[in-house]
Amino acid sequence: MTERIKLIQGTGKTALHYEIIPVGNDWLILLTGGDAHIGCTAIGDDGRLCSYTPQSHKDDALAIPLAKKISETCHCVCTVVAGFHLDEITREQIDEVVANGNIGITRILAAIEEKTNEGGIENTGSII
């Protein structure tokens, strides 16, 4: 297996931690933050999507857009396992987490493109 990519988007309590793992031409992404757990699994397949979110979790707000965008852009299967929890989270902190998630998508696409162009990862789909 090729080298994993690790990224942190944001700082402090609202930071998101990503571990991006190539699996052949596909991608497995672990997205955590705060008190890490498994709060959603989303699978994108060239833009098509399925997901499972356990009761009372809202991690699909982070997992679904990421799985969809990576799978659409890279023409691959992308599985995202996400879990972010912060006790007594404020509206402002929620907004920060969502913003970090949106920026994270862009950074992940750039990191995948860079790895692919280095020749470290073979991907038959086009990136961006």
Image: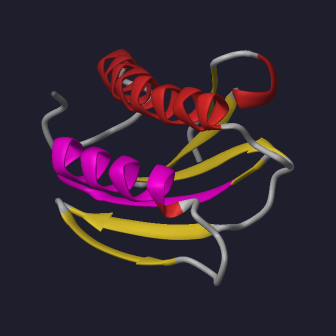
Q: Is residue 62 magenta?
A: yes
Q: In which image quadrant can residue 56 be found?
A: bottom right
Q: Count how many numbered circles sit on residues in the image.
A: 0
User: x, y (%) of residue 27?
Assistant: 44, 51
Q: In which image quadrant can residue 78 be found?
A: bottom left
Would residue 59 appear left or right of 35 to someone viewing this image? left
- Work out whether residue 82 or residue 73 is closer to the camera in this orientation and state it: 82
- Work out whether residue 101 or residue 107 is closer to the camera in this orientation and state it: 101
Relative vertical location of residue 118 with respect to residue 14 in this rendering, above or below:
above
Q: Is residue 123 magenta?
A: no
* Colouring mode (rainbow / by chain / secondary structure / one colour): secondary structure
Say which residue appears at 18% left-offset and 60% top-offset.
46
User: x, y (%) of residue 86?
Assistant: 80, 46
Q: Is residue 23 visible?
A: no
User: x, y (%) of residue 16?
Assistant: 66, 33
Relative vertical location of residue 29 with respect to residue 15 in this rendering, above or below:
below
Say which residue appears at 54% left-offset and 70% top-offset.
41
Q: Which residues are magenta?
A: 61-83
User: x, y (%) of residue 24?
Assistant: 41, 54
Say which residue appears at 83% left-offset and 47% top-offset.
88
Specify the quadrant that holds the C terminus: top left
